[in-house]
Image (cartoon, rainbow, N blue to C red):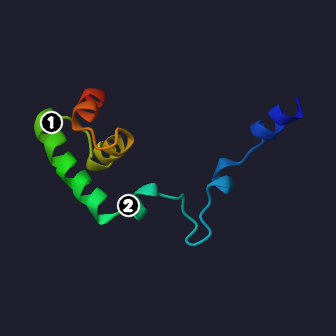
Amino acid sequence: MSRHRAIRNLDLEEEFYDEDDGAIYDEMQDISEDDQLKLNKGVKAVKSALGPNTGIDDKEIKESLWYYYFDEAATIGYLR
């Protein structure tokens, strides 16, 4: 029962606090140049497949591409 209280009282902001600059850690900041190129290529492909008036921003597309390991078809299916 005490584990439930520990989880309930857990402060996520404190757990994910980045001591360097005080911000939440962004995993996209440490990607390689090759992965960055794949992301940029994927964003263009996904945007052209979804059309111009989707209301989906680049950040959401990049996060989805990252989640699906740069699989453009899976990303398009998820975002539709």
Question: In percent of the image, x 27 and y 45: which residue is there?
Answer: 57
Residue at 31 percent across and 43 percent down: it is 65
Residue 21 placement (x, y as % from top left): 55, 71
Q: Is residue 45 left or right of residue 17?
A: left
Q: Residue 31 carries which label?
A: 2
Residue 7 drawn at (x, y percent)? 76, 38
Q: Give the quadrant of the N terminus.
A: top right
Is residue 58 placed above or below 7 in the rendered structure?
A: below
Q: What residue type is labelled 1?
A: Asn
Q: Name the residue under label 1.
A: 53
- Amino acid at dot 2: Ile
Q: Residue 50 location, x and y as percent?
A: 15, 33
Visible in this render: residue 33? yes
Helix, strand or loop at mark 1: loop
Between the residue at mark 1 and the residue at mark 2, the CA separation in whole angstroms equals 29 Å
Residue at 21% x, 46% y: name it.
Answer: 42
